[in-house]
Image: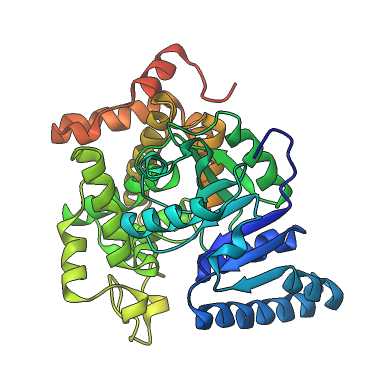
Amino acid sequence: MQTNKAVNLIGIVGAGAMGAGIAQIASQAGQDVVLFDLSKEALTTSATKLQKVMNRLIQKGRVTSDEAIAIQERIVRTTNVTDLKDCDLIIEAVVEDLEVKKHVFKSIEEIAHKEAVIASNTSSLSITSLASFCAHPERVVGLHFFNPAPLMPLVEIIPALQTNRDLPQQLTELMRKWGKSPVIAKDTPGFIVNRVARPFYGEALRILDEGIADVPTIDAAMRESGFRMGPFQLMDLIGHDVNYSVTESVFKSFYYDPRYMPSLTQLKLVEAGWLGRKSGRGFYNYDEENFETVNSGKLDSKIQEEISERIISMLINEASDAVYLGIASAEDVDTAMLKGVNYPKGLLVWAEEMGLQKVVRIIDALRDTYGETRYRCSPLLRKLAAEEGKFHK
């Protein structure tokens, strides 16, 4: 994709929920799309689901009948990979397996034209590693949409070490045309969101394990702080198999840094098959009729403050380190957490509202209590607190 070159045709590899969702986004933005999958059934299912989505949008008055028809007609579905040969941007959205993606990238490179950009929707794999399998790694980039793609505004753009340096900005402009909120992230484990969000789960689990508060109390404390869901509700919704796996992957990828240590408590849920909502039981039992009232008790203000300040401070610390280590700008970190996981505020804006000195005191107190490197304060956070500076100028 050369500078200022029009992106006329979008290719999507994989017609699952994510691939079909990206195809819908592109088509709604007026792009012609080729949706490829080896499974005819997957392609048929994607078409049926899109029809239902369009019917709902018509009923809500968000699109006209003619617009809905045009959106659907702009997507061509195929089981023939050579139909991607004229695409200017090809986005891979298949299973999170390096060997599978390696094979997909090889197949794409064999048929794609020389100026085509090849992007991966991976949420966890190294873009640099994927690019290394390609004859032209300079055109490979990460383009991480969030699920469900048509509804979630965030897109993380991740250049590999080999990526053409002009490509991230070109894709930023394209994603904005698609109505998305793009951010640029360094190619490190978890990118922005899956890295910065770890303390929301990990610190909640630590608080539980220490007996400071039970699951409903911790969840209620975080909802009271402005989060739409508490950490245990969210883990149950994501699925403990998925959430634990991501935590374990980040932990290993960062050479077993204690900040990302998985929880034995969560592992036991996985071993028991208590995966959350999808299995009927996780931290909560979803078969109980009174589930929704479990979290409605009155919350002690002192406990609520202790829980929320501890978790939020650890989130802020992680966000600060992401800026300090050049993972992303302060603006992009805040955008990512607002648009990717619906946090009530950007974490670094939140830090400034709480007072950076206060956040440092909380983290230092945790370090003094536990004596663990898990509770080490980000050098940037400490520096700005000492200088009475700000993340956002």
From the viewer's perspective, tell me whether residue 254 is left or right of residue 156: left
From the viewer's perspective, tell me whether residue 319 is left or right of residue 342: left
Where residue 164 sits in the image (x, y, percent)? Answer: 54, 31
Q: Quadrant of the C terminus?
A: top right
Residue 348: in sight, yes or no?
yes
Front residue (pair 134, 238)? 134
Where residue 364 sits in the image (x, y, percent)? Answer: 26, 27
Residue 273 in the image: above or below residue 160: below
Where residue 351 sits in the image (x, y, percent)? Answer: 47, 32
Name the residue located 79 percent from the left edge and 76 percent from the top edge. 69
Residue 314 in the image: above or below residue 26: above
Report the residue that reaches farthest toward the top: 387
The total number of labels drawn is 0
Residue 387, by quadrant, is top left
Residue 59, by quadrant, is bottom right
Q: Quadrant of the N terminus?
A: top right
Front residue (pair 206, 197)? 197
Where residue 270 sits in the image (x, y, percent)? Answer: 21, 69
Name the residue located 32 percent from the left edge and 60 percent from the top edge. 243
Front residue (pair 83, 368)? 83
Name the residue located 36 percent from the left edge and 50 percent from the top edge. 200
Name the residue located 38 percent from the left edge and 65 percent from the top edge. 238
